[in-house]
Image (cartoon, helix red, strand yellow):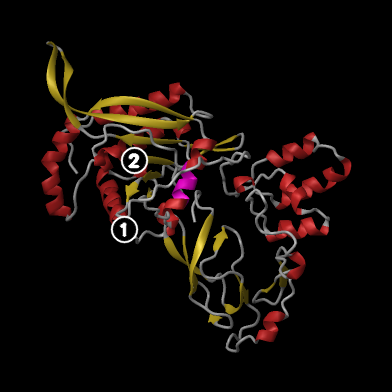
Amino acid sequence: MGESVAEATIIKWVKNEGDTIEADEAIIEIATDKVDSEVPAPDAGILIKKLCEEGDVIAVGQPIAIIDTGGDDHSKKTSPQAVQEIKPAAVQVIASNGHEKTEEPEPVGAENETLQRTGASGRFYSPLVRNIAQEEGIGARELEQIQGSGLEGRVTKKDILNYIPLRKTGGKPSDESSKSESTPLVSRTIQPAMPSAAIKSPQVSVGAEDEIVEMDRMRKLIAEHMVMSKHVSPHVTSYVEADVTNIVMWRNKWKDKFEKREGEKLTFTPIFLEAVAKALKQFPLVNVSTDGQNIIRRKHINIGMATALPSGNLIVPVIKDCDQLNLLGIAKKVNDLAHRARENKLKPEDIQGGTYTLTNVGTFGNVMGTPIINQPQAAIMAVGAIRKKPAVIETPQGDFIGIRHMMFLSHAYDHRIIDGALGGTFVRKVADFLEQFDINREI
């Protein structure tokens, strides 16, 4: 569902146990902090067991249902007795060619209730990890002491398997095993590491006339993501003021013609996105992500644009390969994504794959801002309100004071991999592209 999405809420089951399902047919509706969408069946068959209920919060990668794909005849329903006969030791998936393949065990039942899904510290443990722990005689307290390498410090299968020989010898992993652990997998999902220390919230007093309003689901997940980003990345912000007079004059000349011809508005956002895309091509080390001690250089320039929703929440649809679009193409994409975002009609692919983010705080009259990096990206830029100001204008005949349209650019970046020289030079280059905008350009 996207790099920043770790879990989803089950909204509604479209299919019930015993129902026949076609491949790619929707079986469930889910909601994340980004979008609401349907989950299609990966294959045709019969839904024989639901593994979660409506309202449950499910982690990415956690099984939600068992589908029997055996045979070509899916017309008959599965009896309750047949469902009970499913062995908890392993889920057997029967492919259409008749061959069996065994997936990793998903333990269920009373014998696995000793270890809870959530430990005393609030850390989640998958069924597989709990099953291995019980087989090895690892109790809940000992399980809490194992250092996890997964999302939010979760213990993975590899973590607990590495721990088992160490608890017997009291030793540490060898250099060879440590190196193999740090070797990146090409296909794995990059997840920013969360700090192991628990963050304590301050005590809040509530007055007699105060109103308590519970955060909605989207706001809760946004809050978690923002706190995570600030703890993962040391943020540094560089500022540049740009003279965008040519852009303002050009837009004033074209906006009415554009709206009459295309049936939609021409905003400043496409121009800003074009300048950022050009700068990212010149400075590819800003278009990166961090995975532990590895730097991932992104091949595509996919720029997210932060969009405020009527609910007050925020969503970041992504313009894929922005550097390959002309100004008209970017304008069309911006208007389409912004419209569908406000109508809650974005698809999961519309918010995936972003490599850099632009947010326009000037929309709300703000002069500048200090944006928080959208993990796992390494940087984000905020553009402020355009204001008329007196400025020094340099000409061959000498300097003089004139009224110019000025705008601040704020560039926040991850200081682990982007130093001040690169971060500052990048935002200066974006400003240069804006100041050099051709006033005679057509669209």
Q: Which amino acid does the dot numbered 1 rest on?
A: Arg
Does 134 sit left or right of 297 as displayed?
Answer: right
Question: Which of the numbered marks, if any, corresponds to residue 340?
Answer: 1
Closer-to-camera residue (274/67): 67
Circle count: 2
Does 304 sit left or right of 291 as displayed?
Answer: left
- Whole-percent x, y for residue 68 in the image: 64, 77
Q: Which residues are magenta?
A: 221-226
Q: Which residue is mark 2?
A: 359
Residue 69 part of the magenta segment: no
- Whole-percent x, y for residue 52 in the image: 58, 69
Q: Which amino acid does the dot numbered 2 rest on?
A: Thr
The residue lying at 78 percent from left, 50 percent from top is 161
CA distance separating discs 1 and 2: 17 Å
Residue 222 part of the magenta segment: yes
The residue lying at 78 percent from left, 54 percent from top is 139
- 350 shown above or below 414: below
Badge 2 element: strand
- Whole-percent x, y for residue 242 in the image: 26, 26
Closer-to-camera residue (7/212): 212
- 354 shown above or below 9: above
